[in-house]
Amino acid sequence: MSPTAPTTPPAATATFAISDLAREFGITPRTIRFWEDQGILAPDREGNKRIFTRRDRARLKMALRGKRLGLSLAEIKDLIGMYNSTEDETPQLLQCLRVMEKRRLALQQQREDIEAMLADIGQFESLCREELTRRQGR
């Protein structure tokens, strides 16, 4: 398994240390502190030690997935924050679909832009080669 692939924690473990989550998700404690600073995670404290719950773990997993999908921090926070409010997850699922569609369209546009640039580069390379061939034939 790759070092960034999350592993399943033991079922009996109700809390996690920052090092546990860092190891599980293949990230640094600094990254976890970043998500905490952004309000995504809210671990309990025992002195200076952070104690993360299963809820924190799930929120971290969702945040990392959102980042991997290229969502903005605001989009990630909005989607995660929606899961606090109700038992009916229909609005959250609909919003998630809207965000994913927006992201899909942006990626498709980027792909089209890249294809157009590659075509332009190909044309320019051809012109350069033709000019070199013409100059070598003199």
Image (cartoon, grey):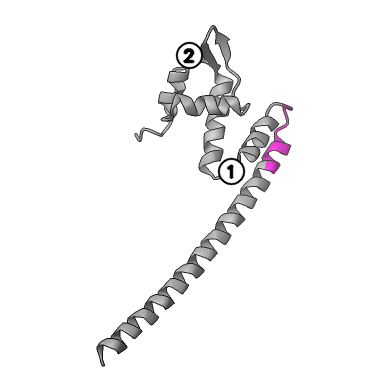
Task: Please report contact status of discs 1 and 2: CB closer than 8 Å, yes or no.
Answer: no
Where 103 falls versus 18 (above or below)?
below
Measured Cα–Cα span from mark 1 to mark 2 = 30 Å
| Position of the N terminus by quadrant | top left
**Residue 136 pos. (x, y %):** 25, 87
| Residue occupying image coordinates x 56% and y 39% | 66
- Element on which disc 2 rests: loop
Q: Disc 2 marks which residue?
A: 13
- Element on which disc 1 rests: loop
| Residue occupying image coordinates x 25% and y 91% | 137
**Residue 92 pos. (x, y %):** 69, 37
Where 100 falls versus 123 (above or below)?
above
| Residue occupying image coordinates x 40% and y 34% | 4
Q: Which residues are magenta?
A: 85-95
Outermost residue to the bottom:
138
| Position of the C terminus by quadrant | bottom left
Q: Disc 1 marks which residue?
A: 71
